[in-house]
C-alpha cells in the first residue's frame, strides 16, 4: 500500500501523542512545536515546487517523524527517528519503497546536511527554514536552553551569537525556491547577529573586539576564496578555449598546404607521368601523404554533438552539465531556463558543472592535439620521404637506369 491521506493523518496523531507523552520537557526546541513548524514548511515548499501528491505525502510523514528520535537519544537521533517511522509504517502495511523514501528523507536532516534528491532537499530546507525566520533569535535561545540541560553546554552571549553566526554562514538552502526566497531573509538574521555581537562588545569592559575582528576576517577570507575560485574557473576555461582555437588554426594550415600539394600534383605531374613513368612511385607517395594529413586535420576540427536532451531527474540529481551546448541544444527554452535556475541557486552544483566543463574541454583538447600531432608527423616524414623518392627517381630516370 502506498502512503495515502489516511496514513498521513494517522502519522500526525501518532506523533502528537508520542511526543506529548514520551519526550522530556527539557527539549525546549526539538519538540512538538518545532515538528509542526517543519510540517507546515514542507506543505509550503511542496506547493511552491509543484511536488506530486504522492511525494508530498511522503514528505509530510517524514516531517512528522523527523525528530521523533529525541525520545530515545540525542546523538544520531535521525537514525532512531527513521527506525520509529519504519516500524510504524510497516505495521500499517505501507510499501517498502515508500518506507525507504521516508527513512532516507529523515536521515538526510543530519547535520551537516547532504541531501540526495529533491524530496530530501525539501525536507532539509523545511527543517532549517527557521534560519530565515523573524523569530530566529528567539528560537536559537530555546536551543541554547535545551543544550544547557541536555548536553551540559553553557555559552556566554557572545559565544552563542558567534556560534550561530558560524553555523548560518556555512549553511545553504538546497531547493531553488529556498535559495531564491530564504537566503535574503537569512542575511537579515546574519546582520542581526552581527549587531548583537557589536552591542555586547561595546558593553564589555576593556578591549574585547577579538570576536568581531575574527568574524570580519573569516568573512573577508571567504569572499577572497570565492573570488579566487571564480578566477580559477575563468582562467582555466579561457586557456582551454585558446588552446582549442590554436589547434583548429594549425589543422587549417595543414589542411590548406596539403590541398595545394594535391592540386599541384594532379594538375602538373599527372600530365607528365605518362612520359616519365619513373615518377609514379614518388607521386603516389606524395599524394598518399597529403591525403593522410588531410584526414587527421579534418578529425582535429570535426565537431562532436551529443543528443542534446536532459531529464528532470538528471537535474534534480545534479548529473547533467548545462554549460555544454551538446547537453541542451534540443531542449525547449522554458525547461532550459528552469534547469539553469536550479544550477544558479546551488553553488555546489554550479561549481561541479564548471569543473566538468573544464574537464571535458581538456579531454576534447587531448584528442584534438593527438590527431594534430599524427597529422603533422605524417606530413613531415611523408614530405621528406617524397622528396627523397623524387630525387632517386630523377637520378635513375636521367641515367636511363629506371626499370621499365
Image (cartoon, rainbow, N blue to C red):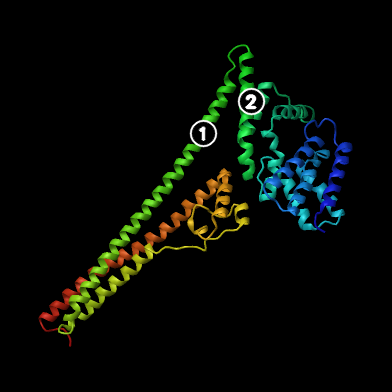
- Return the x and y of residue 175 as percentages of the image width and height: 64, 45
Image quadrant of residue 231? top left
Where is the C terminus found, in terms of image quarters? bottom left
Along the line of sight, the residue nearer the viewer: 239 or 346: 346
Please give the residue where the numbered disc 2 appears in the rendered image: 192
Q: Residue at x 56, y 53 (%)?
A: 334
The count of marks equals 2
Q: Residue at x 68, y 21 (%)?
A: 157
Q: Is residue 75 visible?
A: no
Q: Secondary structure at mark 2?
A: helix
Image quadrant of residue 129? top right
Task: Indicate which label's residue lies in the foreground, 2 or 1.
Answer: 2
Do the residues bearing badges 2 and 1 touch, measured as CB atoms within 8 Å?
no
Residue 172 shown left or right of residue 77 in the figure: left
Q: Residue furthest bottom?
A: 404
Q: Residue furthest left?
A: 399
> Does residue 279 lie above or below 379 as drawn?
below
Residue 357 shown left or right of residue 271 in the figure: right
Along the line of sight, the residue nearer the viewer: 223 or 38: 38
Q: Secondary structure at mark 1?
A: helix
Q: Tell me the CA gap for discs 2 and 1.
A: 20 Å
Residue 59 shown left or right of residue 345 in the figure: right
- Return the x and y of residue 366 as percentages of the image width and height: 41, 58
Q: Earlier in the sequence, mark 2 or mark 1?
A: 2
- Return the x and y of residue 293 as percentages of the image width and height: 31, 68
Please give the residue where the numbered disc 1 appears in the rendered image: 223
- Return the x and y of residue 118 as percentages of the image width and height: 67, 50
Amino acid at each position: 500500500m502506498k502512503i495515502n491521506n489516511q496514513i498521513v493523518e494517522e502519522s500526525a496523531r501518532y506523533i502528537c501523542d508520542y511526543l506529548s507523552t514520551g519526550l522530556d520537557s527539557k527539549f525546549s526546541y526539538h519538540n512538538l512545536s518545532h515538528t509542526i513548524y517543519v510540517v507546515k514548511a514542507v506543505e509550503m515548499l511542496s506547493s511552491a515546487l509543484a511536488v506530486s501528491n504522492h511525494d508530498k505525502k511522503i514528505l509530510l510523514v517524514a516531517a512528522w517523524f523527523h525528530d521523533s528520535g529525541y525520545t530515545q537519544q540525542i546523538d544520531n537521533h535521525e537514525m532512531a527517528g527513521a527506525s520509529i517511522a519504519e516500524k510504524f509504517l510497516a505495521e500499517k502495511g505501507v510499501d517498502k519503497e515508500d518506507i525507504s523514501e521516508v527513512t532516507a528523507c529523515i536521515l538526510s536532516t543530519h547535520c551537516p546536511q547532504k541531501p540526495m534528491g529533491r524530496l530530501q532537499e525539501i525536507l532539509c530546507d523545511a527543517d532549517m527554514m527557521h534560519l530565515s525566520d523573524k523569530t530566529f533569535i528567539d528560537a536559537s535561545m530555546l536551543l541554547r536552553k535545551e543544550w544547557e540541560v541536555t548536553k551540559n553546554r553553557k555559552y556566554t552571549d557572545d559565544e552563542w551569537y558567534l556560534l550561530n553566526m558560524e553555523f548560518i554562514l556555512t549553511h545553504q538552502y538546497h531547493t531553488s525556491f529556498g535559495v531564491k526566497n530564504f537566503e535574503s531573509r537569512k542575511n537579515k538574521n546574519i546582520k542581526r547577529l552581527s549587531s548583537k555581537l557589536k552591542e555586547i562588545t561595546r558593553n564589555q569592559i576593556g578591549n574585547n573586539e577579538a570576536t568581531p575582528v575574527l568574524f570580519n576576517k573569516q568573512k573577508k577570507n571567504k569572499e577572497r576564496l570565492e573570488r579566487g575560485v571564480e578566477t580559477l574557473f575563468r582562467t582555466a576555461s579561457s586557456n582551454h578555449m585558446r588552446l582549442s582555437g590554436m589547434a583548429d588554426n594549425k589543422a587549417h594550415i595543414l589542411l590548406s598546404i596539403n590541398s595545394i600539394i594535391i592540386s599541384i600534383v594532379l594538375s602538373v605531374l599527372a600530365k607528365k607521368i605518362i612520359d616519365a613513368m619513373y615518377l609514379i612511385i614518388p607521386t603516389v607517395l606524395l599524394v598518399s601523404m597529403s591525403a593522410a594529413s588531410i584526414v587527421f586535420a579534418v578529425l582535429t576540427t570535426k565537431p562532436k554533438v551529443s543528443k542534446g536532451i536532459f531529464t528532470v531527474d538528471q537535474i534534480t540529481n545534479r548529473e547533467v552539465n548545462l554549460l555544454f551546448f551538446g547537453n541542451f541544444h534540443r531542449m525547449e527554452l522554458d525547461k532550459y531556463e528552469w534547469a539553469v535556475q536550479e544550477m544558479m541557486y546551488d553553488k555546489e552544483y554550479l561549481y561541479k558543472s564548471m569543473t566538468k566543463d573544464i574537464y571535458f574541454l581538456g579531454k576534447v583538447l587531448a584528442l584534438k592535439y593527438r590527431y594534430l600531432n599524427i597529422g603533422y608527423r605524417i606530413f613531415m616524414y611523408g614530405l621528406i620521404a617524397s622528396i627523397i623518392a623524387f630525387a632517386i627517381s630523377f637520378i635513375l630516370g636521367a641515367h636511363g637506369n629506371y626499370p621499365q
